[in-house]
Amino acid sequence: MDHFTASTDPVSGSVAASAIVALVPLLTFFILLAFVKVKAHVAGALSLVVAIAVAIWAFKMPAGLALLSATQGAVFGAFPVVWIVIMAIWLYQITVVSGRFEDLRRVFDVIGGGDVRIQAILVAFCFGGLLEALAGFGAPVAITATMLVALGLKPMKAAAAVLVANTAPVAFGAMAIPITTAANLTGLDADHIGAVVGRQAPLLAVIVPLILVFILDGFKGVKDTWPAAVVTGVAFSVAQVLCSTFFSYELTDIVAALAGLGAAVVFLRFWQPRGLDAARERMGLTALVAAGTDRPGTGSGSTATAVRDEDSLTPSRTWLALFPYFLVIVIFGIAKLWKLGVDIPAFLASTDIKIPWPILHERLVDEAGNAVSSTIYTFNWLSTPGTLLLITGLIVSFVYSKFDDGGRYRMSVGNGVAEIGRTMWNMRWAGLTILSVLSLAYVMNFSGQTVAIGTWLAGTGAFFAFLSPVLGWIGTAVTGSDTSANALFARLQQTAGLEAGIDPNLLVAANTTGGVVGKLISPQNLAIAVTAVKLDGQESVLLRKVVGWSVALLLILCTLVYLQSTPILGWMLP
């Protein structure tokens, strides 16, 4: 195979013509998903074939190098991306298998004090953020939607509320794997990208709890509960800023969710929302009250019934329910920050294995004839968040096996380890989608397709900063994954930024943050939400309820990013 150097104008010597041809694999992927309605992993595989064909015949890349590019993308997709996702979901599954998840759900009922609007903020926003941090991929929407319906909320309102609530934490979801993916594909510093996202996404965190209450109870509900909503949202957003800047971008959502929950707990000790009885009537919850219950969701068999039993939620059970999430913070904190005596971050980094991708590394060169550095694969077997989550899960399994509360909780280390296999099996199709999308991204990146598109779009100049979040919005809306949107567009954003004279870190971060509000209207998420609340087939109705919020939040982000690219708000950036 000959050496290959990517160019921006291989088609008729025109950047525009080359960019239009390079868009074909992306259009194939989006059309197959949105209109042909094929499975995501099938759409990814077919689009990969198209990308390889375009690389070979339009961008003149040797066929062997195109195929090797796809293999490197697939391996990176498997490890660390899929590894992190599986371990994050597995840690959550341990709480379910052990029965501790039910205790955690009861904690929110106790804190909410019987006001379903406050409970919705705690469940959909705070706990949903915690689930997004660990699991992502639709799990937070499904789980929190069923919890809100159990509180007595109407199914469609519950579905709309959880979709809106799920926007705030998505950028840092699944241990911030969207940011890790973007950094790997662009060569930019992940910590810096995370810090920039931490100057954008927190704006949504302040607004989202208010929107959530408005969806459930209109302007009157907002008027009654806004202090609690603002306190929770501000605590969440401040924690996002601080954690992404000074601590660990991977832990941002976990810290933010716990901070929001903690702020709500403290605030509600001194302040209570008004108009509870009127709110119950407006939301159709009066029938539950008339039936003899003292708050929504306390009918037979509900979690709230258990809460009324004085023995149902002891301090030790509350602590053990929260234990996995605190332990994650401790372990990641040690891995990222501990330098007393032994420099743990340096030790972990020293275990990384750098692997020049066979043949590809020698043959893929830049204009100066030097090997492209992105063809070196880093096997970070110990330092990756996935392995840290594995360690966390094993410790949690051991602790849970020792504290079974007289047999109430049936959990063993063996059960915990066995759940890894079940999680892998349940994630098989999602995993294949991730592998195919990252293979597609690597082929487009190495062949020059992404650079051609980025160079073409950079022709809009400074205005591209305003359009930047729209790409992430479209990518996540179609794929249902901010990680996939970054895999598709992060390199494009970087190229456009360099060509237009805009900080590429800002644009890559904007792609990530734009994806946050795109997930609100993703067909995948809409389907998960309506299925969870037993309204199968009503995706279009739900879409009409949330699309306005998605567009409005997108315009806010576009304006913010544009102003951050200028001296007006440039001071906000790290």
Image: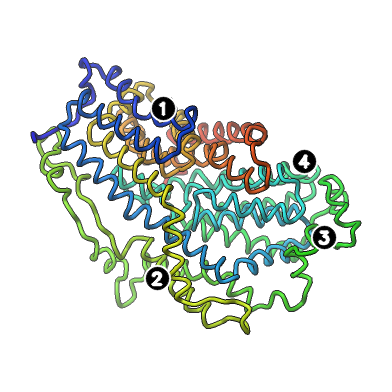
Residue 207 appears in the picture as rendered: no
Q: Earlier in the sequence, mark 4 or mark 3?
A: 4
> Which residue type carries mark 2?
Ile
Pointer 3 and pointer 2: residues touching (CB < 8 Å)?
Answer: no
Question: What element does badge 1 sit on?
Answer: helix
- Residue type marked 4: Gly
| Residue drawn 60% across the image and 51% down it | 142
Q: Residue at x 84, y 54 (%)?
A: 276
| Identity of the residue furthest to the top in this view | 12
Crowding near the residue tagged with mark 4, few <14, some 14–19, many ≥20 C-alpha atoms within 10 Å: some
Name above or below for residue 159 compared with residue 452.
below
For mark 4, what is the residue? 218
Could you tell me residue 549's position as x and y percent?
63, 35
Which residue occupies the foreground of this view, 429 or 514?
A: 429
On the rendered image, what quadrant is the N terminus found in?
top left
Q: Nearer the viewer, mark 4 or mark 3?
A: 3
Disc 4 to disc 2, C-alpha distance: 45 Å
Residue at image mark 1? 464
Q: Which badge, 1 or 4, is on the more N-terminal residue? A: 4
**What residue did someone put label 2 on?**
391
User: How far apart in space, not on screen, are marks 4 and 3 (Cα)?
Assistant: 20 Å
> Quarter-wise, where is residue 123 in the image?
bottom right
For label 2, the crowd category at 10 Å Cα-Cα, with few meaning under 14, some 14 to 19 and many 20 or more, is some
- Please name the amino acid that badge 1 sits on: Phe
Label whose residue precedes the other's in the sequence (4 or 2): 4
Horizontal and vertical percent position of residue 213: 72, 46
Residue on which disc 3 sits: 295
The image shows residue 385, relative to residue 4, as above or below, that is below
